[in-house]
Amino acid sequence: MKRPRIIIAGVGLAALAAAGGITAASASGSTPTTSTSAASKNTAQATVRTASVTVAGKTETILVNSQGLPLYIYRPDTATRSLVTGGLAQLWPPLTSPAFVGAGVTGKVAVLKDVNGQQVTYNGHPLYTFADDHAGQVTGQGVQNFFVATPGIASITMSAGSTGPATPSVRSGGYGY
């Protein structure tokens, strides 16, 4: 019963190719390298820092990991739970580490113990890399409801009495997610 997975993977690759966020190596059907995943699943101290990169044709300051890979948030996540698992987590590896440091950032860097282990968060947002990115290169912006994490992203909040998913808000600047 691998056929449904192949179809879903093909649709995902087609969507990435249409968005212009895919390399020839990925389009040829090769699997993502483990170096990107290994960079995200770091057993040493994880670093969250800022870098200036081009996002949608405009130079922006975003959050990156210690290897310079752009960090992303997933819009449906909550402050207490990552919804990125299975095949989605293979394309969008969670940034996990038992220890972390925020270098030159003003937001709160912490660890959330969830389905992905000890996942690093920024202002409550679980953080991810994208399997197709390289240091200083953003190719996953807006793909599959993932958006680059920016230093000014507001904390995920829950309205009083709400039991539904948390919704992120953005302070001035940023990407309106």
Image (tube, rainbow, N blue to C red):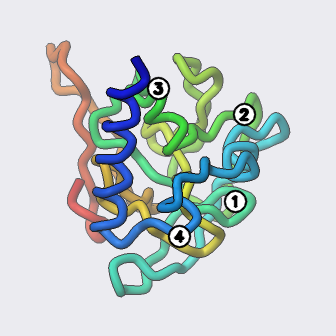
Q: What amino acid type is highlighted by mark number 1?
A: Ala
Q: CA distance from mark 2 to mark 1?
A: 15 Å
- Which secondary structure, mark 4? helix
Q: Which mark is nearer the camera, 2 or 1?
A: 2
Q: Residue at x 80, y 42 (%)?
A: 45
Q: Position of residue 170 (x, y in %)?
A: 27, 55
Q: Which is more foreground, mark 4 or mark 1?
A: 4
| First-in-chain label (1 vs 3) | 3
- How far across and how far down the image is residue 101, in percent? 72, 47
Tell me if mark 2 has few (under 14), some (14-19) or many (20+) residues whose alpha carbon lies within 10 angstroms of its own. many
Q: Circle 1 is placed at which residue position?
A: 103
Disc number for residue 85: 3
Q: Earlier in the sequence, mark 4 or mark 1?
A: 4
At x 44%, y 35%, the residue is 88
> What whole-number distance in Å separates the C-alpha atoms at marks 1 and 3?
28 Å
> Which one is closest to the eye, mark 3 or mark 2?
3
The vertical placement of 100 against 80, above or below, is below
Dividing the picture into quadrants, the one containing residue 111 is top right
Front in this rendered view, residue 5 or 160: 5
Q: Which mark is residue 24?
A: 4
- Comparing marks 1 and 3, which lies closer to the viewer? 3
Q: Which residue is mark 2?
A: 97
Task: Using the image, determine if residue 53 lies above or below residue 143.
Answer: below
The secondary element bearing badge 3 is classed as loop
Quarter occupied by the N terminus: top left
Residue type, numbered disc 4 = Ala
Q: Amino acid at mark 3?
A: Thr
